[in-house]
Amino acid sequence: MTILVTGGAGFIGSNFVLDWFQTSSEPVVNLDALTYAGNRANLASLQADARLSFVHGDICDRALVDSLLATHQPRAIVHFAAESHVDRSIHGPGAFMKTNVDGTFTLLEAARAYWGGLAGDAKAAFRFHHVSTDEVYGSLQPGAPAFTEDHPYEPNSPYSASKAASDHLVRAWHHTYGLPVVTTNCSNNYGPYHFPEKLIPLMIVNALAGKPLPVYGDGQQIRDWLYVGDHCSGIRAVLAGGKLGETYNIGGWNEQANIDIVKIVCGLLDELRPDPAGPYARLITYVTDRPGHDRRYAIDARKIERELGWRPAETFATGIRKTVQWYLANADWVASVQSGAYRDWVSTNYAERA
Ligand code: NAD
Ligand code: TYD
């Protein structure tokens, strides 16, 4: 038995592959285009492990996906590959439509042809697991109940619109063709290997470099943060026991305002790597807000707990401490991903926010 993972060199995908081999010896084929967000070094500890095969390629390449399915005969596809950063989607939505919409369409069509050719137990066991986001549900008012699985779709950014489109395709391929799909919609993740364009790792690496900590708008936007290892265990639970055609929300019951997250990160750095120049919070700088910025996300994760017994193992206090420690211990990884292209992105996104 084998699973095909897409986007396994990115933040969540690589954590998923690393976690997979902690609990399973089932081989993994990792299809990843190695965009700016993909990094083979994330899986360096598995380099000599024969259970992991890496394929450098694009999910939009139908012939490649067909040949991987025919060769490896996976019992499941776990689909992480995506363009994932809201700010980049505002500057350049085209790549999001291509990978998140066309790429998911291509995978679904390849999966449908492959699954259609299976028989008996192999056909019954096959799963297409689509990894998605809470951002498809839009923005919550203060005090409104958290997102349940039947909350209306109201995506507001090019990123969330492209993910919403992909969720709809997955749903339709189940209803129309019977493709055995499950979808998970997860809240904001944090943890090791998080690319330093996103809030938490950006704050850590900027603080350590003595650079400003750019907080958009008033910093009161709320996200529901989940440690990435808990997202991975939630995906494993849904892959193993989720009902076909169903969606499962995954979240940490951990709503926090951005400014509070930044202050927590600063406090941990003050403790673990004190700066002689003074507390890191001195670097906090309020900058121009993100256009169309969603005010609040919150996940109601009762369905996955009730049906599959999943709950997060980490609290935010334990997860964020581990995360800050990981960044302190992995300065080489941080340096390796801060390429010229990364510096270009930082100047594109932040120059105009002064
Ligand atoms: P990421 O940007 O860190 O990684 C994406 C990976 O996909 C990279 O390795 C990249 O090289 C690869 N990729 C991109 N385009 C590709 C293509 N056309 N073909 C093959 N590979 C391609 O993203 P992430 O944060 O790890 O997110 C993974 C998935 O989880 C995404 O689908 C995202 O929407 C979803 N998600 C993310 C979060 C979060 O907080 N990061 C929360 C909920 C859901
Ligand atoms: P991000 O990590 O980009 O995730 P998402 O937009 O998918 O939730 O951003 C998390 C929150 O942090 C979001 O409200 C935007 C905010 N933010 C900042 O205030 N400053 C920054 O430099 C970044 C990247 C994000």
Image (spheres, helix red, strand yellow):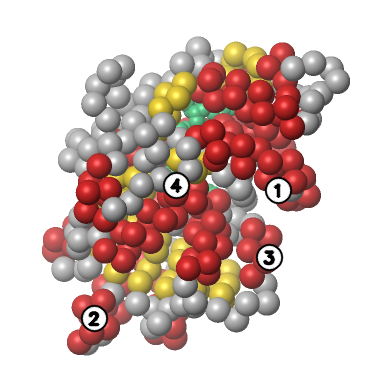
> Gap in Å between the C-alphas at discs 1 and 4?
29 Å
Q: Which residue is mark 1?
A: 337
| For the residues bearing labels 2 and 4, Cβ distance under 8 angstroms | no
On the image, the x and y values in percent for residue 14 come to: 55, 58
Q: Which residue is mark 4?
A: 313
The three-letter code of the residue at mark 1 reads Val
Estimate how packed mark 1 is, as few (under 14), some (14 to 19) or many (20 or more) residues with alpha carbons within 10 Å: some
What's the residue at 56%, 63% (across, down)?
A: 18
For label 4, the SS is loop
Mark 1 or 4 closer to N-term? 4
> Gap in Å between the C-alphas at discs 1 and 3?
14 Å
> Gap in Å between the C-alphas at discs 3 and 4?
26 Å
Q: Which mark is residue 123?
A: 2
The three-letter code of the residue at mark 4 reads Ala
Residue 331 seen in the current view:
yes
| Most foreground residue, 49 or 97 | 49
Estimate how packed mark 2 is, as few (under 14), some (14 to 19) or many (20 or more) residues with alpha carbons within 10 Å: some
Q: Which mark is residue 44?
A: 3
Task: Give residue 344's quadrant in the image.
Answer: top right
